[in-house]
Image (cartoon, rainbow, N blue to C red):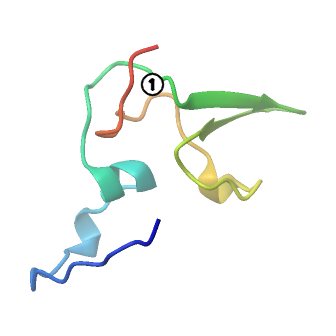
Amino acid sequence: MEQIELNLGVPIDESKLGPNAMMNLNGYGPEGKRCKHLFAWKYAGTYYKCGQRQNTNSAATDQRVNWKACSKFIER
């Protein structure tokens, strides 16, 4: 599948983007719920990841459990 980029001429205020990349990309989902895509890798610690996102095995792709779900939310 080829990704198409749309330029709507609307500037993005990057100061309002949060640390949750999935919400910045897809928008907000329901608050206070955990998504089916959220999973944990357990090594020396527990690292939560999103199954809808490419994981790089680094902290850059970690998801926080207390973050809001994105618009791709699927109930567990």
- Residue bearing the label numbered 1: 35
Q: Is residue 20 among the parts visible in the rendering?
A: no
Res 18 → quadrant: bottom left
Residue toward you, 55 or 62: 55
Q: List x then y, in percent, for residue 32.
A: 33, 19
Of residue 43 and residue 4, the one placed in the foreground of this image is 4
Image point (34%, 40%), residue name: 70
Q: Which residue is painted at 20% across and 74% down in the image?
A: 13
Q: Where is residue 29? Give x, y as percent.
A: 26, 34
How far from the left and from the top, in percent, is residue 67? 41, 35
Identify whether 2 is placed above or below 66: below
Q: Are there few (<14), some (14-19), or many (20+) residues within 10 Å of tag 1?
A: many
Q: Residue 9 or 62: which is nearer the viewer?
A: 9
Residue depicted at x 34% and y 58%: 25
Q: Amino acid at mark 1?
A: Cys
Q: Residue at x 28, y 73 (%)?
A: 14
